[in-house]
Amino acid sequence: MKLIRVADAAQAGKVAAEIIAQKIKSCPDCVLGLATGSTPIETYNNLVQMYRQESVDFFRVRAVNLDEYIGLGAEHDQSYAWFMRQYLFDHVNIDPANTYIPNGLETDSDKECRRYDAVIESLGGIDLQLLGIGPNGHIGFNEPADTFAKGTHRVDLTEATIAANSRFFESIDQVPKQAYSMGIQNIMHARQLLMVATGENKARAVRDAFRGAITPWVPASVLQLHPDFTLIADEAALSLVLDKL
Ligand code: F6R
């Protein structure tokens, strides 16, 4: 595991964008695994800026997202499909046909999960997966559980995650209760993993994931086993581990 310490979320976004841009330069048709939530917004803002300055080209990039809410279509403004267009895809020259996200409107979950795993396989796997971390240690929507989920699966979101995500909705009742998410195996098969963790509300998750035992009760702890995992974190997120990582 490699740790990059940064001052704050703005610097974290800059560093993450540079690493992603470097990947695109060395592999113009790379497969990027992308995340949503508040953490990657700074990263996407920086990538858009780099694209405008012609220092990165998304023309041949393929992008596959970690997760999507069940029940929200791509035109719903809280869907992750919408989020990706809003913060990245509409502002760079990525081909929309090369962007993939689970279909939140598919009610046959077995079918959708098999389809999404087949999409990832048909792309040849993920070259670089960007990750955030939930305050409860989740990655993608792999919630604390007694086993690690392998492939794409339907998730019942925990009360904690519903509460954490309610800040994006008008009321907590509007937050979907389920999601499709890549599994731990999908994520662990990515050739390179990049996590961004900033802010004090991530400190406990960072401590439990990277200082504690590897357990599905802290899903991100499995990343300790990945051969090419980088954590970009600010002092607030590292406040409970100090210099011990
Ligand atoms: C979203 C995702 C989630 C988030 C996590 C942190 O695609 O994969 O695991 O990364 O919930 O969310 P924020 O960044 O909003 O704190």
Image (cartoon, helix red, strand yellow):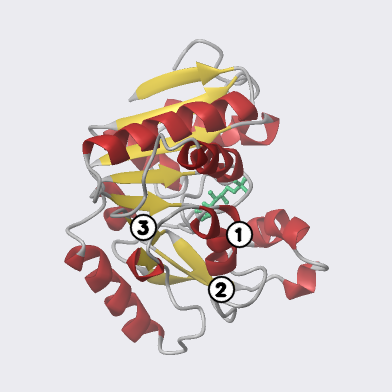
Secondary structure type for disc 1: helix
* Whole-percent x, y for residue 41 in the image: 60, 45
User: Of all residues shown, which one is farthest toward the bottom?
Assistant: 108
Q: Disc 3 vs disc 2: which is toward the camera?
A: 3
Q: Is residue 105 visible?
A: yes
Whether the residues at callouts 1 and 2 have beta carbons within 8 Å, the answer is no
Between the residue at mark 3 and the residue at mark 2, the CA separation in whole angstroms equals 23 Å
Q: Earlier in the sequence, mark 1 or mark 2?
A: 1
Amino acid at the residue labelled 3:
Ala
Residue where numbered disc 2 is placed: 178
Viewer-proximal residue among 78 and 222: 78
Amino acid at the residue labelled 2:
Gln
* Whole-percent x, y for residue 145 in the image: 45, 57
Query: Where's the C terminus, which quadrant?
Result: top left
**In the image, what residue occupies the spot 51% across and 41% down?**
52
Viewer-proximal residue among 29 and 65: 29
Residue where numbered disc 3 is placed: 63
Q: Is residue 93 left or right of residue 111?
A: right
